Image: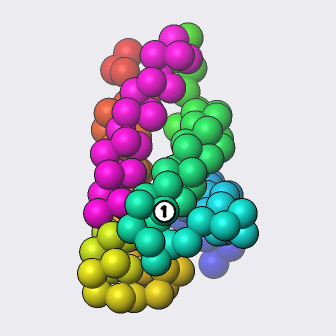
Amino acid sequence: MIKLIKDLMIKYREIIIYLIVGVLTTIFSWAACWVAELLGLDSTIEWQNHIINTIGWVAGVLFAYPLNRKWVFQSTNPQILKEFAGFASSRLSTWILDILIMWLTVNVWGLHYWIAKIFISSVVVMILNYVFSKILIFKKKDK
């Protein structure tokens, strides 16, 4: 049984580490959103909701890139700035999706900000970020 668990952990290492890094990134991003609210931004006001989400997005990208580069995808690409630009660009699309989801769920449907953030937007964004990172940013080159 222990060997089976060990084999599964080896086989799915990248996904397991991505989930751990993703959860840490999400917590960091949410903390930035929470601080923005503490500083007086109101998520029920549409333009302030966008600012809160943008602050969270920037914090998340800056936090996530080095962890994804080193621990998840174990990138050795020497062009770090180019790689980061690609990473940030791919995350830009999920940031726009996050803004749309949060606007729709909070400002149109009236859901509570954190319910929408935790159970809808973050799940969709985390899955898409993995796919984009795996396929576009940290793709392994054939030797």
Give residue 62's position: percent from left, percent from top.
Answer: 61, 39
Query: Does 139 sit left or right of 5 as displayed?
Result: left
Q: Which residues are magenta?
A: 79-100
Given residues 80 and 49, the one toward you in this image is 49
Query: Does 108 sit left or right of 53 as displayed?
Result: left
Residue 78 sits inside the magenta stretch: no
Residue displayed at 53% across by 80% down: 114
Image quarter of residue 31? bottom right
Give residue 93's position: percent from left, percent from top.
Answer: 31, 45
Give the residue furthest to the top: 78
Give residue 107's position: percent from left, percent from top.
Answer: 34, 78
Q: Is residue 35 above or below residue 13?
A: below
Given residues 100 and 25, the one toward you in this image is 100
Residue 86 sits inside the magenta stretch: yes
Residue displayed at 40% across by 27% down: 86
Is there any visible trace of residue 83 in the rendered image? yes
Given residues 77 and 53, the one toward you in this image is 53
Instruction: Identify the secondary structure beneath mark 1.
Output: helix
What quarter of the picture does the C terminus occupy? top left
What quarter of the picture does the N terminus occupy? bottom right
Q: Is residue 8 above or below residue 117?
A: above
Residue displayed at 50% across by 72% down: 43
Image quarter of residue 85? top left
Give residue 95's position: percent from left, percent from top.
Answer: 39, 51
Image quarter of residue 127? bottom left
Is there any visible trace of residue 16 in the rendered image? no
Q: Is residue 102 above or below residue 95?
A: below
Instruction: Give, as a three-letter code, the residue at label 1.
Output: Gln
Instruction: Give the residue number, with chain letter if any, for mark 1.
Output: 48
